[in-house]
Amino acid sequence: MSDNTWVAIAFGYSMNSGLDIAMIKVINGRVFVTDESVHHYGPSMPDYSQNVQAQRASYANGVLRVTFLRPVFASEYFADHSLAGCTPWQFVTVGGMVHGYRRIGKHFQFPIIRNVCTQQCRI
């Protein structure tokens, strides 16, 4: 992964219906993890309530490692998606460029979409 780029995990069906996003940006070698949402085909915006919490984050020699926590149940009905039951998770492994600290460019590749059933997840 290059510096000044982003990757993400989005929860929900589509940008049209709205996505809840764990956004991960590498800016000048520093890692930023934010809770964002997107509605339709515009830019994502940070959520009012930041409920994605980075536990560990590192970026060295082009390798990004991030561990984060995110509640299963939604706290902002208009921005968050509940992860209870089975939900589409969209893995954006090849994101886009970060312009400044806030604006992001369109992803370079389409997300990998998997239906995740949290009741079947085991630690």
Image: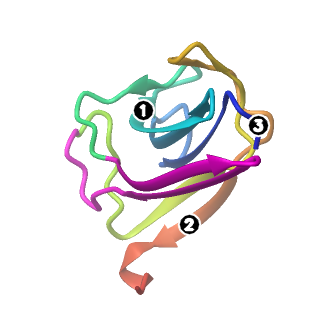
Q: Residue furthest top?
A: 100
Q: Is residue 12 magenta?
A: no
Image spot of residue 35 (x, y percent): 38, 38
Q: Residue at x 41, y 33 (%)?
A: 36
Rendered-image quadrant of the C terminus:
bottom left
Q: Is residue 78 left or right of residue 99?
A: left
Q: Quadrant of the N terminus?
A: top right
Label 3 sits on a secondary structure element that is: loop
Q: Amino acid at mark 3?
A: Ser
Q: Which mark is residue 2?
A: 3
Which region of the structure is painted magenta? 52-76
Q: Secondary structure at mark 2?
A: strand
How crowded pointer 3 is (Cα within 10 Å; few <14, some 14-19, many 20+) is rated as some
Q: Which mark is residue 115?
A: 2
Q: CA distance from mark 1 to mark 2?
A: 19 Å
**Residue 20 location (% of width, % of height):** 42, 41
Residue 88, position as x, y percentages in the image: 53, 58
User: Separation of disc 3 and disc 2 at Cα?
Assistant: 28 Å
- Main secondary structure along the magenta-highlighted residues: strand
